[in-house]
Structure formats: C-alpha cells, structure tokens
Amino acid sequence: MNKRDVLELRRRFKKDNCTISRMAGCYVDGFKNKVLTFNENFLNLPEEEFYKYMELAKKTLGGNIGNNLLELEFPQEEEEPGGRQQYYMGLKSGDLKNDDLLDRLYDLIIENYVHTGNFLILVFKDTYDVMSRTSDNIKLDESEEVYEYILVSVCPVDLSKPGLGYREDEHRIGARIRDWIVSAPEIGFLFPAFNERSADIHKVDYYIKDPKDSPPEFIEEVLGCGVRRTATELKKTFEAIVKRSCGENTERAQSIFTDITESINSRVEELK
C-alpha cells in the first residue's frame, strides 16, 4: 500500500461517494463481556449516526505508512483451509450476514486486544468500483476492478469527563450527566490489502493509532501474520542498541545516534 492508495480509499468516506453496504458491531464491557451486538444496513442509518460511523472508518486508514499503517503478509499455512486468510475471505463474501463468523471475529479480538475498559468493535463491508486511470491520473468511465473489502475498527469507549452543566429539567447549574463516548479507533485492519489500486488477498493492511506500542498478540492471533515493527519501534530499538554499546557515556551515545539519524535522513532525501 502506498500513500496514493490510502488517499483514494479515504476520499470515498463521504456521503456522496460512500458505498458501504453493511455494518456489524459488538460492544464489550471492561470484563470482556459482550453487552450488545448489532448488524445494520449502513445506508439506512440516521444521518448524524451515518457521519459519525463513517468518520471512525476513515480514521482506521489514518496516519503514516510504515508507522501507523503496516502491510502484513499471510504465511502459507494461513492461506490453507481453516487459516485466517480463508476465514476473512468467507467473512467478506458473506456480506457480514453470517453470525457465527462475526462471533468468531469478536471472540478473537476480545481475547487478544489489550485494553482496560469498555470498547466497541465495528466491521464495515464495502464494494468499490475501481475506475481505470490514464497515465496522467485522469479517470476513465470504465471499471478496472471491483474491490470488495471489510474494514475492522476497534474503538475505546470511555466515560465523558465530570463537570458542571445546565440541568434544563431543574432549571439550575449542576453536575453534568456523564455518558459513555466512543473514541477514535485504537487498532484495526483492512482486508484484502489495497495495493496499486487492486485487491491483494495475500496481505492485510494493519492500523495502530500509537506506533510506540503495537501489540504482537493482535497481529499473530487475530490476523495470523508475523509480527512487524513500526518505524517508531524500530527507532527505539536502534537507539537502545547504540546506548548499550556506549555504556554509561550517555552523551556520546546521543551524539552517535543523532549523527546516524541525520545521515539516514539525508540519504532518504537524496533518493527522493
């Protein structure tokens, strides 16, 4: 997946361009109990809810490629019957109407998503008619491919902050009623991967909001892929190696790390 692929998908999360047909979800409490499940026709949602959910979907494709967005490849065994790739193919082709497949996804995420508190699992199903483009990126009115995919977002659900507010029923200023609010997705994925404007069923695009701490158990157990570190994690590991090699001379370690980083950045700019 490159930046242009990401932007092409993100631009579609607008009222006029949106073709998401279905959305399923599961609300989980802090004890990992399923409180609520739902499955709805996305285009029939009330307008205010429609836009809020669409924004959550869009944010699951946010951030920087290589840091917040990683392309992961399924190992061979996961592409065989019973593997994760085969499972996600079935979930996608079933239009989110198979409750058993959805429950399996919810259980996988509940078991492997490390979070203290309530959270919401959302699954979107979309079909994108990818139009052909000329060499100078001008759209043609003919379909190149029908890209059918699922997008999964896992969003923390937190209590609103305490405070004062106007109590209309009592006509006074008092303690504000605290509500459970769905936050931006913390982790998620897109299957199949969108690569060079085409579906790649051998890969999945993985999203992590905080690239400093990507959970390996989610990648291995939910996605069935080998762990891949984000750019931030690689930088932290490299910095730790430099510091360890310099012993107690932290000033020298920092100087060496800065020199190497600047040299790499300079080389990247030259290649660009």
Image (cartoon, helix red, strand yellow):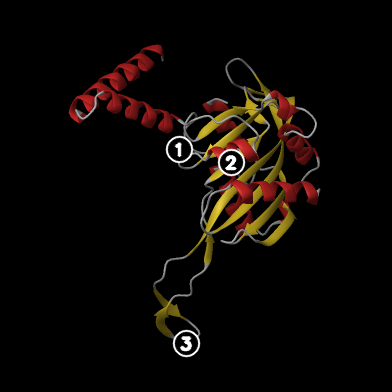
Q: Is residue 17 left or right of residue 62?
A: right
Q: Position of residue 111 (x, y in %)?
A: 62, 49
- Tag 3 residue: 170
Q: Measuring 67% from the left and 46% from the top, which residue is drawn there? A: 108
Q: Residue at x 64, y 44 (%)?
A: 152
Nearest to viewer (mark 2 / mark 3)? 2
The answer to which of marks 2 and 3 sits earlier in the sequence is 3
Check residue 266 in the rendering and tell me which mark sits there, or answer none: none
Kindly tell me whether residue 90 is visible in this rendering.
Answer: yes
Q: Is residue 160 above or below residue 114?
A: below
Q: Residue under label 2, please give it.
A: 218
Q: Residues within 10 Å of mark 2 (few under 14, many from 20)?
A: many
Rendered residue at 56%/42% (across/down):
60
Kind of residue indicated by mark 2: Phe
Q: Which of disc 1 and disc 3 is earlier in sequence?
A: 3
Q: Earlier in the sequence, mark 2 or mark 1?
A: 1
SS at mark 2 in the image: helix
The CA distance from mark 2 to mark 1 is 14 Å
Mark 1 = which residue? 211
Residue mark closest to the camera, 3 vs 1: 1
